[in-house]
Amino acid sequence: MASSSGDSKRASSSIHEGASDDNQSALQKHVVFFDQNKDGVIYPWETFQGFRAIGCGILLSSFAAVFINVGLSKKSRPGKFPSLLFPIEIKNIEKSKHGSDSGVYDKQGRFVPSKFEEIFSKHAQTNAHALTSDELMKMLRANREPRDFGGWLASYTEWKILYVLCKDKNGLLQKETIRAVYDGSLFEQMAREKASATKHAA
C-alpha cells in the first residue's frame, strides 16, 4: 500500500506541479508578490507598489493597478457584493483565469509542465529556449478563442509587459524567465535587483 501511494503521488506530480507545503497553487504563487502586507488580499495600491518595486514607471504601474484589479476583483470574490476598492482574493485567484491563454495553469491554478513545453515546441523557431517578439505575437494569435475579446486583451497585455521588461539584449524572452514568472519567483528577483541598483546609485 505504501508503495502504491508513493507511485500515485509521483504520477500526480508529473502531471501537475506548483503545490507547496502550505497548499499554495502555482497561480497563487504567481500573484502573492503583489500582496504587500501578506493578508491574502491584493488592493490596487499594492499592485501599483509591486510594479514599482520591479522597476516599472509610474504610468505603467498605474495602468497595471487599474487593469488588473478591476479585471480580476469580482471574479475572485464569488458571492460577495462588488467593492469599489477592487480587492483580489488570492485564495480564489483561479476563478479569475481569463480565456485565450497558454493553458499552463489548469482550472485549479496548478502548473502544467506539458503546456509550458508546448510554448517552445510550437512557437520557438529562432531559438529553442526563447521567444522573439514575432514568435510571441504568433503564439498569442494561436491561443485566441473566438470572440473572447477580454481574453485577447488580457493575454496581450500580460505578455507584452513581460517582453518589454525582461527581453535580453538580443530581443529574446528566455525560457527560464518565462518559467520564473509562472511561479512568481521572477518578481522577487526583479525587486531585489531594483533595490540593489537603487542602493548602489545612492
Image (cartoon, helix red, strand yellow):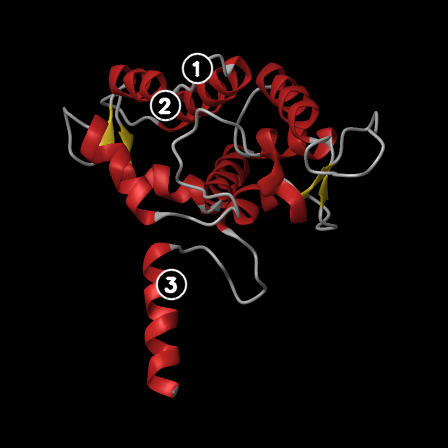
Query: 10 Å neighbourhood of mark 3: few (<14), some, or many (≥20)?
Result: few
Any part of residue 33 in sight: no
Q: Which amino acid does label 3 sit on?
A: Ser
Identify which residue is drawn at 35% across, 38% down. 177
Q: Which amino acid does label 1 sit on?
A: Pro
Q: Name the residue under label 2.
A: 143
On screen, residue 189 above or below 155: below
Q: Is mark 1 on a helix, strand or loop?
A: loop
Give me the C-alpha separation between circle 1 and circle 3: 32 Å
Q: Residue at x 48, y 12 (%)?
A: 147
Q: Which element carries disc 3, helix, strand or loop?
A: helix
Relative image position of residue 156 (x, y in whole percent): 45, 18
Q: Label 3 belongs to which residue?
A: 12
**Above or below, 106 relative to 6:** above
Q: Are marks 3 and 2 in contact (CB under 8 Å)?
A: no
| Mark sitting earlier along the chain (1/3) | 3
Question: Along the polypeptide, which appears first: circle 3 or circle 2?
Answer: 3
Mark linked to residue 146: 1
